[in-house]
Amino acid sequence: MAGIRRGEPSDLAEVAAIQEASPEAARWNVSEYLQYHFWVAVHGNRIVGFLVSRNLAEGERELLNLAVAPEFRRQGVGHELLATLLAEAPGVIYLEVRASNQVARSIYKSKGFQEVGSRQGYYENPLEAAIVMKFHSC
Ligand SMILES: CC(C)(COP(=O)(O)OP(=O)(O)OC[C@H]1O[C@@H](n2cnc3c(N)ncnc32)[C@H](O)[C@@H]1OP(=O)(O)O)[C@@H](O)C(=O)NCCC(=O)NCCS
């Protein structure tokens, strides 16, 4: 079981390694995460996952990135990170996910996100549509 806490500058190298090992995740300069709502999952003394979101407006949040280290997947870490986001952000949460990323679409659906649209050609390398998903807390 991982513990969830806010991300700190000293976590960024491990977060970058997880992002690098997760080609399905968004590619950010990880130092930018510090200006947003940045959570990490900790197991022992390791960072095993992270989630970043930002405010769009009052009561509106966007999930920017989520990834779990490959060797810690399917153990509930993604679920815990998303549960932390849902508890922290009442209102509406939006996200985009690659159409082919069935694993992520599945976890988001299991947490109550609904698919509300798609954006053709949204992603590059490879070119692919984004599925837009929305969570409403009430
Ligand atoms: C998506 C991701 C964060 C899920 O993290 P995780 O810690 O493995 O997820 P969990 O163990 O909490 O799984 C929760 C639910 O997700 C779904 N899920 C997770 N892995 C799955 C898989 N390999 N196949 C199908 N469903 C899966 C299931 O609904 C699962 O619930 P269940 O185990 O009760 O069936 C992880 O696979 C990952 O880092 N992927 C690469 C990056 C990525 O795609 N990020 C999303 C960008 S939008």
Image (tube, rainbow, N blue to C red):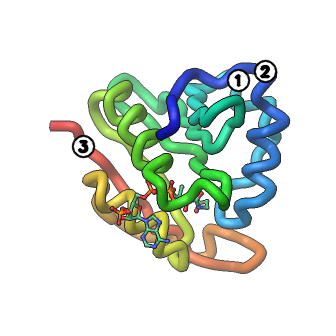
Give how far apart the Cα atoms at labels 1 and 3 are. 25 Å
Q: Quadrant of the C terminus?
A: top left
At label 2, counting other C-alpha atoms closer than 10 Å, the crowd grade (few under 14, some 14-19, many 20 or more) is few
Residue furthest front as drawn: 44
Please name which of the two marks, 1 or 3, marks the residue nearer to the observer: 1
Q: Is residue 13 left or right of residue 11?
A: right
The image shows residue 103 at horizontal and vertical percentages of 48, 70
Q: Residue at x 43, y 35 (%)?
A: 61
Amino acid type at image mark 1: Leu
Amino acid type at image mark 3: His
Which element is circle 3 on? strand
Q: Is residue 49 left or right of residue 9?
A: left
**As rendered, which of 121 and 31 lies closer to the eye?**
31
Q: Is mark 3 within 8 Å of ligand 1?
A: no
The image shows residue 130 at horizontal and vertical percentages of 53, 68
- Name the residue tied to disc 1: 34
Residue furthest left as drawn: 138
Circles 2, 3 touching at the beta carbon (< 8 Å): no
Circles 1, 3 touching at the beta carbon (< 8 Å): no
Q: Earlier in the sequence, mark 1 or mark 2?
A: 2
Q: Earlier in the sequence, mark 1 or mark 3?
A: 1
- Name the residue tied to disc 2: 9
Give how far apart the Cα atoms at labels 1 and 2 are. 7 Å
Quadrant of residue 22 in the image? bottom right
Amino acid type at image mark 2: Pro
Q: Against 137, is 18 above or below? A: below
Q: Is residue 41 left or right of residue 80?
A: right
Disc on res. 136: 3
